[in-house]
Image (spheres, grey):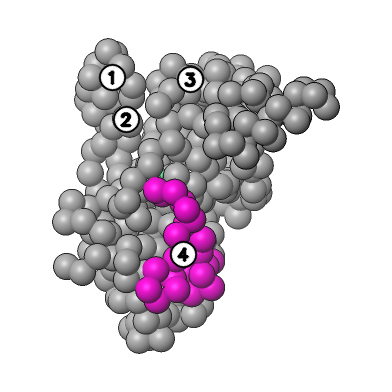
Amino acid sequence: MSNLRDELIEHGILADGGAPGLYHRGGAFENVVSGIEALFRSLDPYDSPRWVMSPVTTAQVLVDTDYVESFPQLMGLLDGFHGDAREARTLADTAHDGGEWWQQLDATGLALRPAACHGLYPLLAGRQMPPGGGHYEISATCFRHEPSDNPARMQTFRMQEFVVVGTPEEARAFRDAWLERALDAHRSLGLVVEAEAANDPFFGRASQMMSQGQLEKELKFEIVAPIAQETPNAISSANYHEDHFGTSFAITTSTGVAESACFAVGLERSALALFRRHGVEVSSWPTDVAARLGL
Ligand code: AMP
Ligand code: ZN
């Protein structure tokens, strides 16, 4: 197989963003992303209110969602300059001399958002969900510090998520229904996909136990498709969080602590899987696929 990354860059689909996993997106790529987003939105049976979350969050949200504990290796925090004029001159001199000028910065208390739906739960804090559950469409540009030359593993990428916060039955049924719906949707675009039980990349000593628990309880499923390597990548994920966010953010239903589930479409990865499948010339993609994506 030719190198997909090089091929995409040669054809102006992506441009190198200057560090592993950073990319600029060309018009053809963005048209495909918009088509995928519109297709999945059209499948949402709840006509959910839509929120595009800020790509920057308070660092406190990483604590409240347990991200700090579970995925410290993926976090990205923002530093700022808080010094006076003299310190500003030292900063600039250090930078121009090729020194480690960022050592002179301090934390802002802000972080890059690691997952789209983590922006929702703080908005629902302390609230009781209506019968049937609260349904939302949440998207965001996310950051994960996992530099790689594999174009399927970006450091910034977008997620379009469909989320329910409600009873355990509502959460499980929602997750399972989206998994089926999404398999059909990806297949309708000509992709060869499969659903697999999956686990998150938990950090450290407890990671094996956490991953095992997630697999045994079947909390996470991924829809995988070939992208740049023979081993397929997750192009979307269906997650059942049990009461994790309901407890952390004191969200309830009339019967107790709320549970939640989300279905996350990886917009870049879904687009990349289509470029891998149908080629870099969008004008020669199958007409039914192009029509479904509004191309
Ligand atoms: P997760 O929260 O890990 O289940 O991620 C949700 C979706 O985001 C996954 O199914 C992928 O499609 C996508 N995704 C996760 N990590 C990356 C990455 N490093 N680069 C591009 N897409 C990603
Ligand atoms: Zn989510």
Secondary structure under the numbered disc 4 in the rendered image: strand
Q: Are marks 2 and 1 in contact (CB under 8 Å)?
A: yes
> Which of the two marks, 2 or 4, is nearer to us in this view?
4
Placement of 281 over or under 6, stated as above or below:
below
**Disc 1 element:** helix
Of residues 59 and 11, the one drawn nearer to the viewer in this rendering = 11
Neighbour tally class for label 2: few under 14, some 14-19, many 20 plus, Cα within 10 Å: some
Residue 46 visible at all: yes
Amino acid carrying mark 4 in the image: Ala
Q: Nearer the viewer, residue 253 or 52?
A: 52
- Find residue 12 and report its horizontal and vertical position in percent: 45, 73
Q: On residue 68, which mark appears?
A: 3
Q: Which residues are magenta?
A: 9-34
Q: Quadrant of residue 107?
A: top right
Which residue is denoted by mark 4 in the rendering?
A: 15
Of the two numbered discs 4 and 1 in the rendering, the one whose residue sits closer to the viewer: 4
Pick whichever of labels 4 and 1 is earlier in the sequence: 4
Q: Can you name the residue that lies furthest to the top here?
A: 205
Mark 1 to mark 3: distance in Å? 13 Å
The residue positioned 40% from the left and 32% from the top of the image is 240
Residue in the picture at 56% in, 18% down: 64
Q: Give the left or right position of residue 200, taking residue 252 as reference.
A: left
- Which residue is at 32% across, 66% downward? 6
Instruction: Give the residue type that dot 2 points to.
Output: Pro
User: Distance of mark 4 from mark 1, alpha carbons?
Assistant: 35 Å
Q: Indicate yes or no: mark 2 CB to ligand 1 under 8 Å.
A: yes
Check contact, mark 2 vs mark 3: CB within 8 A: no
What distance separates the C-alpha of mark 2 from that of mark 4? 28 Å
The first of marks 3 and 4 along the sequence is: 4
Numbered mark located on residue 207 in the image: 1
Residue 81: % across, % down: 72, 28
Name the residue beneath numbered marker 2. Answer: 201
